C-alpha cells in the first residue's frame, strides 16, 4: 500500500511539474495582429482628373441644330471659361448613373424639345442618386426659359424639382427687362454687371439657396450650397448671348474650384477692394470661382477648395476658438488655407490661426527690412532666387517684393520655408528709422501639410495688393514675380486632399526646353496633386526623393554613372517621362532609353496627307492622331485626339506598348519621303518595378501655339488629358513585391528558426506582412502571424508535427494592394526522435525543463528511500 502511494506520489509530482508545459504546448500561439498604419500611395483615378475640368452636358431634348441653344451655350462657355475644360454629351438620361462619377459638372442645357412628362421621367430616373453626387461635391447647373407653350414652360427645372435639388415655381418671362445683382459677393456674380434680359430670360420663385440676380421681385439666378457641392438655376437659355450671362455660366462651372475670401472679421482687403486684381487673375487664368464671406458661414467654407484669411487694420476681430477649430478641421479633411499676416496689431486677426498650426510672428511695429535689397528706405525688400524655395508654390517665381511685412519667428517642424530673409547680416527689423539686424534667415512665407490639407502662410498682406506701394508705376501684385507667386500658391493649395508625389524636372544637361517654357504643364501637374521641383545640376539625392523624373532632350549626354542613377531610380519603382524630337534633338534620349529596349527613329519627322496641317502637304507636319491610332491602355483613357508638332517615331519599343501609332492607310510618311505606316509615335514600357513614357515631340509640353489656333500645345485636343493620365500611370499604386528567402525549399528544420523574406513597394509605401504555413505542399494555408513590419519572424517549429510537405507564404500589403510569395519547394520539419508524440512539442528548452523535473523527482525518491532505511 505504501509502495503504491509512493509511486502515485512520483507520478503526480511529474505530472504537476510538466502540466503547465503541456497546457502551453497545446494552447494556440501566435502574435496578435497590429493595426495597419501604412499610408499607401494615392489611388490616382484616370477619369477623375482635377484639371481639365470635366463637364457632362445633358442634351437629350435640347435644340442641337446649328444656331440652337446647345451650340450657342457651348460656344459661349468655351469662350469665357477657356480651354482647360473637357466635356461630353449625354443623350440618354438612363445612362447618367453609370457615368456621373466621372465628371465634375452636370450641365442641363435647356430641354426645349421635351414635355413635362419626359422631364418628370428624367427626374424619377435620377432621384435615387443625384443628390448624393452633389452632396459629395458635384455641381448641377440648370438652364431654362419661359414660354406660354407647355413644352417650353420651364421644363428643365422640373428635374431640379423632382430630384429635390431646388424648388422652382411661378415662372415669369423677363425678355428685355433689367436684371440686377442681388448679391454681389456670391461667386456667380464676380466680374458680372447688370444686364438687360435677352430672348428667353425668365424669373422664378424659390425657397432654396441664394438669389444672386433678380428682377421684378423674383429670382433670375439662384445658387444653393448643397453639402460639398452646388446647385445653380439660371433663368436664361443662351439663345441670345450676352457677355454677362456668359460669365455667370462660366462662374457656375468655376464652382469646381471655389476660393472663399473671408471678410467676416472686418478684413481690410477683399476681392472687390484691395485684392481685386489678385481675385480676377486667378478667376480668369486658373478657373477659380471667387466668393466673399461677409458673415461666418461654415457651409460656404465646406464647399470651397481654398479659404483665404486676411488681416484687419481698423477694427480687429480675431478668429475665435470655435472658428479656429472649424478651420483646422476643414484643412485636416482636405482643404486649402492661405493665411496672411502683418506687422504690429494689424496681424492680430489671424494670430489665432497661426498659433493653432504652430507659427509665431514678430508682433512689433518693426517691419522686415534689408540694407541692400530694398526700395523706399527698406520698407519694401525684394528677395531673389537664393531666398526662394524649389517648390510647386514657387513655380515661375524668380524674385518677389514685399511691403512692410513681418516675419515668422517660429514655424512648425514640418513647415517648408518658401521665402526667407537674407543670412548675410543685411536683414533686420526697421522700427522708427532704427535698424537692428536680428531677423537673419527668418521665414516670410511657408507651406505646410495639416492632415490631408495644405496651408500657406505669408507674412505680408500687401504683396498681392491693388495699390502701388513703392510708386514704381505698377501695382504691388505685379511687382517682380508676385503675380506668379500668387498663382502658384493658389494652384498648390487647390490640390489639397491629394497625397503628394514629387515630379522633378531634371535640367542638368543643357535641355532644349526647361521648366520656364513649360510652366503651364508644371501647373497642370500641380493642380493634379504633384509637387514640382527642378534642378540644373545632376543630383542623385534629388532624383531619389522624386516619384517621377521629367527629362527634356539636351545637347550634353549623361555620363555612365549618371545613367546608372536613372536606371536604378526606375528599377526601384520610379517613373521617367522623356521628351525628345527628330535629328539633333534626340541624341541624348536614345543613349538613355536603349536600356529599356527602346530606340527613337530620329532621322526625320512624321507627316500625314490627310491629318496634317499648318503647312500644306508634303509639309503637313502638325499631325492629329485620332482614336483609331490609339491603343487600349490606361494612359489613353478619355483621350480621343492627340496633336503632335513635327514629332518623330520609334524604330523599336522593345516590350513596351505603342500608345499612339501613325495611320496604316498609306497616308503617313517620314518627311524624307519614306512610308511610315503604323510607326509608334508615343510609347510606354515597364522596367523592373518602374515605368517609362517616351514622347518624341519637344513642343508637347510647351506654352507655344504652332498651329495658331489660340490653344497652346499643352491644351490642343486632349493633349492635357494625356499628360495627366501619363503621370498618374507613372506613379500609379502598384502592389508590393515580396520574395521568401528562408525556408525556400529543401531545408531540414527543427527547434526555433527565423522565417526571412525581402520586400519592396514600387511606390515606396510602408508595408505590413502576414505569414502563412502549409503542411500539404500549399494545398491549404493557416495563419502563423500578421501585421509584422519587419522582414523576419521567429518561428517555433516544435509546435508542428514532423513532416516533409511544409511551405511558407508571405503576403505584403501597402494598405490597399498586396503581393505574395511562397517557398519554391517544400521543406521538412524533424523535431521528434522516433516520431513525435501527437501534439506534444519537444523543443530543446522544453527538454531541459523536463530533465530538470526528472532530477527533482529522483532527488525526492532518494530522500524517501533514505528515510525508509
Image: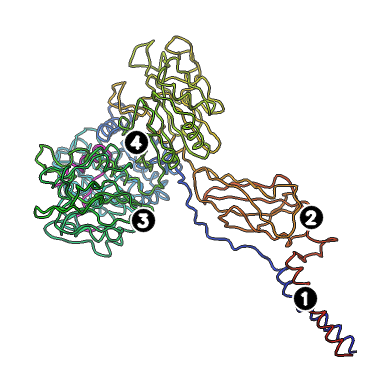
What residue did someone put label 3 on? 332
Tell me which residue sits at (17%, 55%) in the image: 343
Nearest to viewer (mark 3 / mark 4): 4
Nearest to viewer (mark 1 / mark 4): 1
**Residue 499: which disc?**
none
Quadrant where the C terminus sits is bottom right
Mark 3 vs 4: CB contact within 8 A: no
Left or right: 323, with 525 as reference point: left
Mark closest to the chain's N terminus, 3 or 4: 3
Q: State the SS at label 1.
A: helix
Mark closest to the chain's N terminus, 2 or 1: 2
Task: Please report the bounds of the magenta region as a residue range.
Answer: 273-296
Q: Residue 550 falls in which quadrant of the image?
A: top left
Nearest to viewer (mark 2 / mark 3): 2
Mark 2 vs 4: CB contact within 8 A: no
Q: State the SS at label 3.
A: helix
Tell me which residue sits at (39%, 40%) in the image: 49
Q: State the SS at label 4.
A: helix
What residue did someone put label 4 on? 522
Mark closest to the chain's N terminus, 2 or 4: 4
Left or right: 94, with 290 as reference point: right
Q: State the SS at label 2.
A: strand
Near mark 2 (Cα within 10 A), the count class, few <14, some 14-19 or many ≥20, is: some
What residue did someone put label 2 on? 803
As for residue 774 lying within the magenta part, the answer is no
Amino acid at each position: 500500500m505504501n509502495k503504491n502511494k509512493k509511486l502515485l506520489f512520483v507520478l503526480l509530482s511529474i505530472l504537476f511539474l510538466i502540466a503547465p508545459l503541456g497546457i502551453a504546448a497545446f494552447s494556440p500561439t501566435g502574435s496578435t495582429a497590429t493595426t495597419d498604419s501604412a499610408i499607401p500611395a494615392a489611388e490616382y483615378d484616370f477619369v477623375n482628373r482635377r484639371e481639365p475640368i470635366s463637364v457632362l452636358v445633358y442634351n437629350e431634348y435640347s435644340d442641337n441644330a446649328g444656331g440652337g441653344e446647345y451650340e450657342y451655350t457651348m460656344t459661349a462657355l468655351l469662350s469665357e471659361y477657356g480651354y482647360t475644360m473637357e466635356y461630353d454629351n449625354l443623350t440618354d438620361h438612363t445612362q447618367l448613373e453609370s457615368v456621373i462619377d466621372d465628371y465634375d459638372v452636370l450641365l442641363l442645357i435647356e430641354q426645349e424639345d421635351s414635355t413635362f412628362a419626359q422631364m418628370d421621367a428624367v427626374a424619377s430616373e435620377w432621384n435615387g442618386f443625384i443628390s448624393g453626387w452633389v452632396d459629395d461635391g458635384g455641381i448641377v447647373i440648370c438652364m431654362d426659359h419661359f414660354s406660354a407653350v407647355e413644352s417650353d414652360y420651364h421644363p428643365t427645372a422640373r428635374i431640379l424639382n423632382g430630384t429635390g435639388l431646388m424648388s422652382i415655381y411661378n415662372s415669369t418671362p423677363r425678355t428685355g427687362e433689367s436684371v440686377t445683382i442681388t448679391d454681389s459677393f456670391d461667386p456667380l456674380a464676380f466680374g458680372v454687371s447688370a444686364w438687360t434680359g435677352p430672348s428667353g430670360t425668365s424669373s422664378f420663385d424659390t425657397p432654396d439657396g441664394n438669389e444672386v440676380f433678380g428682377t421684378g421681385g423674383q429670382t433670375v439666378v439662384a445658387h444653393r450650397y448643397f453639402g460639398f457641392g452646388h446647385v445653380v438655376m439660371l433663368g436664361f437659355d443662351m439663345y441670345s448671348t450676352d457677355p454677362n450671362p456668359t460669365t455667370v455660366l462660366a462662374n457656375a462651372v468655376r464652382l469646381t474650384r471655389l476660393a472663399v475670401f473671408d471678410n467676416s472679421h472686418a478684413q481690410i482687403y477683399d476681392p472687390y477692394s484691395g485684392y481685386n486684381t489678385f481675385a480676377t487673375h486667378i478667376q480668369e487664368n486658373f478657373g477659380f470661382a471667387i466668393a466673399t464671406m461677409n458673415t461666418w458661414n461654415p457651409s460656404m467654407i465646406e464647399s470651397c477648395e481654398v479659404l483665404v484669411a486676411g488681416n484687419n487694420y481698423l477694427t480687429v476681430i480675431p478668429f475665435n476658438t470655435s472658428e479656429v477649430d472649424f478651420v483646422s478641421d476643414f484643412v485636416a479633411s482636405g482643404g486649402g488655407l492661405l493665411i496672411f499676416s502683418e506687422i504690429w496689431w494689424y496681424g492680430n486677426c489671424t494670430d489665432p490661426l497661426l498659433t493653432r498650426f504652430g507659427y509665431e510672428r514678430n508682433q512689433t511695429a518693426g517691419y522686415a527690412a534689408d540694407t541692400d535689397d530694398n526700395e523706399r528706405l527698406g520698407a519694401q525688400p525684394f528677395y531673389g532666387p537664393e531666398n526662394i524655395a524649389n517648390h510647386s508654390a514657387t513655380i515661375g517665381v524668380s524674385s518677389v517684393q514685399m511691403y512692410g511685412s513681418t516675419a515668422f519667428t517660429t514655424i512648425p517642424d514640418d513647415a517648408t520655408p518658401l521665402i526667407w530673409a537674407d543670412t548675410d547680416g543685411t536683414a533686420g527689423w526697421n522700427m522708427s528709422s532704427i535698424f537692428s539686424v536680428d531677423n537673419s534667415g527668418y521665414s516670410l512665407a511657408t507651406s505646410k501639410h495639416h492632415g490631408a490639407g495644405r496651408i500657406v502662410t505669408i507674412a505680408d498682406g500687401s504683396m498681392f495688393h491693388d495699390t502701388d506701394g513703392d510708386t514704381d508705376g505698377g501695382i504691388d501684385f505685379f511687382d517682380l514675380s508676385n503675380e506668379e507667386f500668387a498663382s502658384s500658391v493658389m494652384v498648390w493649395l487647390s490640390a489639397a486632399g491629394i497625397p503628394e508625389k514629387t515630379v522633378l524636372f531634371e535640367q542638368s544637361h543643357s535641355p532644349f526646353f526647361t521648366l520656364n517654357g513649360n510652366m503651364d504643364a508644371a501647373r497642370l501637374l500641380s493642380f493634379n496633386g504633384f509637387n514640382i521641383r527642378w534642378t540644373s545640376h545632376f543630383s542623385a539625392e534629388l532624383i531619389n526623393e522624386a516619384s517621377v523624373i521629367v527629362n527634356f532632350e539636351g545637347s550634353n549626354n549623361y555620363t555612365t554613372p549618371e545613367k546608372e542613377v536613372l536606371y536604378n531610380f526606375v528599377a526601384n519603382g520610379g517613373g521617367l517621362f522623356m521628351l525628345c524630337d527628330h535629328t539633333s534633338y534626340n541624341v541624348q534620349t536614345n543613349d538613355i532609353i536603349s536600356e529599356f529596349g527602346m530606340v527613337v527613329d530620329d532621322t526625320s519627322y512624321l507627316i500625314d496627307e490627310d491629318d496634317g496641317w499648318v503647312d500644306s502637304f508634303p509639309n503637313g507636319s502638325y499631325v492629329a492622331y485620332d482614336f483609331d491610332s490609339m491603343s487600349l491602355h490606361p494612359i489613353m483613357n478619355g483621350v480621343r485626339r492627340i496633336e503632335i508638332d513635327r514629332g518623330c517615331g520609334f524604330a523599336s519599343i522593345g516590350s513596351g506598348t505603342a500608345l499612339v501609332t501613325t495611320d496604316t492607310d498609306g497616308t503617313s510618311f517620314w518627311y524624307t519621303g519614306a512610308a511610315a505606316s503604323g510607326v509608334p509615335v508615343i510609347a510606354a514600357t515597364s522596367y523592373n518595378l518602374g515605368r517609362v513614357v517616351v514622347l518624341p515631340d519637344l513642343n508637347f509640353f510647351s506654352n507655344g501655339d504652332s498651329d495658331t489656333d489660340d490653344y497652346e500645345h499643352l491644351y490642343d485636343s486632349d493633349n492635357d488629358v494625356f499628360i495627366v493620365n501619363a503621370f498618374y500611370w507613372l506613379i500609379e499604386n502598384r502592389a508590393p513585391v515580396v520574395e521568401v528567402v528562408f525556408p525556400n525549399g529543401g531545408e531540414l528544420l527543427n527547434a526555433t528558426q527565423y522565417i526571412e523574406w525581402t520586400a519592396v513597394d514600387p511606390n515606396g509605401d510602408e508595408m505590413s506582412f502576414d505569414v502563412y504555413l502549409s503542411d500539404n505542399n500549399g494545398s491549404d494555408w493557416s495563419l502563423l502571424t500578421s501585421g509584422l513590419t519587419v522582414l523576419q519572424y521567429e518561428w517555433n517549429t516544435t509546435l508542428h508535427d514532423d513532416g516533409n510537405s511544409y511551405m511558407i507564404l508571405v503576403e505584403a500589403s501597402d494598405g490597399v494592394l498586396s503581393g505574395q510569395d511562397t517557398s519554391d519547394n517544400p521543406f521538412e520539419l524533424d523535431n521528434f526522435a522516433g516520431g513525435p508524440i501527437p501534439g506534444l512539442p519537444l523543443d530543446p528548452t522544453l527538454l531541459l525543463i523536463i530533465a530538470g523535473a526528472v532530477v527533482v523527482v529522483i532527488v525526492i525518491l532518494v530522500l524517501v528511500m533514505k528515510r525508509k532505511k
